Amino acid sequence: MTGPARIRDLLVHAQQQLNDSDSARLDAEILLAFVMRVPRETFYAHPEDMVAADQICDYLSLVSRRASGYPVAYLTGQKEFWSTELTVNQHTLIPRPETECLVETSLELIPEQAGLDILDLGTGSGAIAIAIAKERPGSQVTAVDVVAESLTVAQANASRQRLSNIRFLQSDWFSDLPHAVFDIIVCNPPYVDTRYRGFTDGDIRFEPRIALDGGHLGLTIINHLVPASIRHLKPGGYLLLEHGYDQAPSIQHLFKLNNYRNIRTRCDYAGQERVSYACLS
Ligand SMILES: C[S@@+](CC[C@H](N)C(=O)[O-])C[C@H]1O[C@@H](n2cnc3c(N)ncnc32)[C@H](O)[C@@H]1O
């Protein structure tokens, strides 16, 4: 394509380039909106508007990277989560819509007026910590990750929201929090089976392996965190874990073995079992 082109024609062209993706049209629109610095909705009102040649050049280069599988969120450096635009980069997991189910479940356990101590283990872009800190300004959130670059992104995301009730800490799970105790521990851990083929040929190959690889059956880290959390929960405190669609029975069993009670599992918006949680006596 050379010279200026209409928005409508450009989107059709990009959609054809992206026909491997099941979200081709959406991806094409998000990338064009990013390059033109306009909201995507303007394309519906003004499909005949012309796009400048230099913008087309930038756009086609993004479309070609997307066609090779590179995630849209890494191309734009942005992802919306819990109605907040977050910066993401190749050091952070791209927050997923199903993780909003973990936030929702956590909020049900945190009364609006209460000042609870909450831990977000493996915070990544800060998605969960920021959502909870915004919704529960009276509570104090500690956000932990072992990856320093992730914490830099999470901190910047929190600053943009002007949140003063989050602190960030680099730690290998609980290792730098030896004596801290919390009312709520929330965690979206790496839970993908280490043998999953998508690590080599799926879109997730572009995301940090440390954020996704949960070892044998995807349960190695969860097997560590469920007993380890006991020393860090106040009496009556809750541990909430996101997990794979088929992992709830194993996690419920693990909770029972470790004397947790009120064990529950919640489905995500797609109807898959996604969050299990339980409390300590
Ligand atoms: C599935 S991602 C979740 C990211 C974010 N909470 C979200 O939901 O979008 C798991 C996170 O755990 C972090 N992580 C992996 N190993 C860790 C460890 N040993 N200690 C602390 N965090 C770790 C990864 O860096 C990653 O940010």
Image: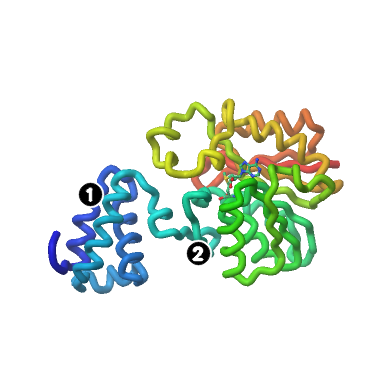
Q: Position of residue 194 (x, y in %)?
A: 53, 29
Which residue corresponds to mark 1?
A: 17
What residue is shown at x 79% (from left), y 63% (from top)?
114
Mark 2: few/some/many CA within 10 Å (<14, 14-19, 20+): some
**Considering only order in the chain, which callout, 2 or 1, is on the residue closer to the N terminus?**
1
Mark 1: few/some/many CA within 10 Å (<14, 14-19, 20+): some
What residue is shown at x 69% (from left), y 31% (from top)?
223
Q: Is residue 90 left or right of residue 188?
A: left
Using the rendered image of the protein, determine whether residue 236 is visible from the camera's viewpoint.
Answer: no
Disc 1 to disc 2, C-alpha distance: 27 Å
Q: Amino acid at mark 2?
A: Glu
Q: Is residue 254 left or right of residue 50?
A: right
Identify the image quadrant of residue 261. top right
Q: Position of residue 104 (x, y in %)?
A: 63, 54
Q: Position of residue 78 (x, y in %)?
A: 45, 60
Which residue corresponds to mark 2?
A: 85
> Which scheme is used to colour this image of the protein?
rainbow
- Marks 1 and 2 close (CB-CB < 8 Å): no
Looking at this view, is 131 or 204 the one in front? 204
Q: Where 6 falls versus 150 (above or below)?
A: below
Identify the image quadrant of residue 27. bottom left
Q: Amino acid at mark 1?
A: Gln
Identify the image quadrant of residue 202. top left
Q: Is residue 35 left or right of residue 264?
A: left
Q: Quadrant of the C terminus?
A: top right
